[in-house]
Amino acid sequence: MRSAEDRVWTVPNALSMLRLLGVPVFLWLVLGPKADGWALALLMAAGLSDWLDGKLARAFNQTSRLGRLLDPLADRLYILATLIGLTVREVIPWWLTALLVGRDLVLLLGVPVLRRHNLGSALPVHFLGKAATAGLLYAFPLLFLASHAGWYADAARIMGWAFAIWGTGLYWWAGALYVVQGRRLIEAAGRA
């Protein structure tokens, strides 16, 4: 008998899957036809669906193992696609991209260690990680808007960099907490 945790077809999972399908579309819009309005709308819709899928999963008791995998995967891929697109277009500097990708690479190095100790490959997401991701998902559309000429550009630049700085700081802080959490799990597994 399958448990509720094994569900695949839920509204939150469908939203996460749609978000995943939007990643290559977003990258194509930014780098191909440079359809910035559509790319920005897609990025904002992805941010909204990220918030909505978690809200719906908790409200309607539709949390699942697949959802806990898809949601952070979609977040990471949107962040990576946005970093690639905006760095190539010179909207954000390469060093910001290096900082954010570097953090994910550090955590990726821990996956084989966790697996070696039979702890799976993913640590539970905590609030700080979610706050960091939210900050970055606010920063990128604002910085994208700031790269265009318009009355909104200066305000978008200030708010975008504020979210980018806070988001990057929280992203690394959350990464450090994940490393500590992983180390504690490994130590506990060694004692057991």
Image (cartoon, rainbow, N blue to C red):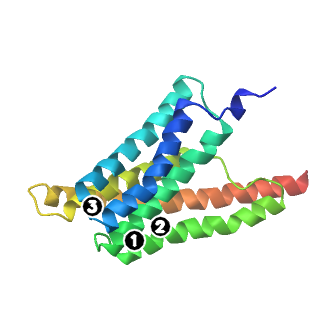
Quarter-of-image position of residue 166: bottom left
Residue depicted at x 10% and y 59%: 150
Q: Quadrant of the N terminus?
A: top right
Callout 1 amino acid? Leu
Local secondary structure at mark 1: helix
Say which residue label 2 marks.
Answer: 100
Q: Say whether marks 2 and 3 touch (CB < 8 Å).
A: no
Q: Say which label, 1 or 3, has the lower sequence index.
A: 1
Callout 2 amino acid? Leu
Residue 53 spot, x, y in % from top left: 49, 35
Residue depicted at x 62% and y 64%: 107
Callout 3 amino acid? Leu
Question: Quick one: label 3, few (<14), some, or many (20+) residues within 10 Å?
Answer: many
Residue 12 in view of the camera: yes
Residue 143 circle label: 3
Question: Quick one: label 2, few (<14), some, or many (20+) residues within 10 Å?
Answer: some
Local secondary structure at mark 3: helix
Residue 115 spot, x, y in % from top left: 79, 59
Residue depicted at x 50% and y 47%: 130
Residue 137 circle label: none
Question: Quick one: label 1, few (<14), some, or many (20+) residues within 10 Å?
Answer: some
Q: Nearer the viewer, residue 191 or 139?
A: 139
Local secondary structure at mark 2: helix
Residue 113 spot, x, y in % from top left: 77, 65
> In the image, 61: left or right of 95?
right
Q: CA distance from mark 2 to mark 3?
A: 16 Å
Residue 125 in view of the camera: no
Say which residue label 1 marks.
Answer: 96
Q: Nearer the viewer, residue 14 or 135?
A: 14
Q: CA distance from mark 1 to mark 3?
A: 12 Å
Residue 173 spot, x, y in % from top left: 52, 59
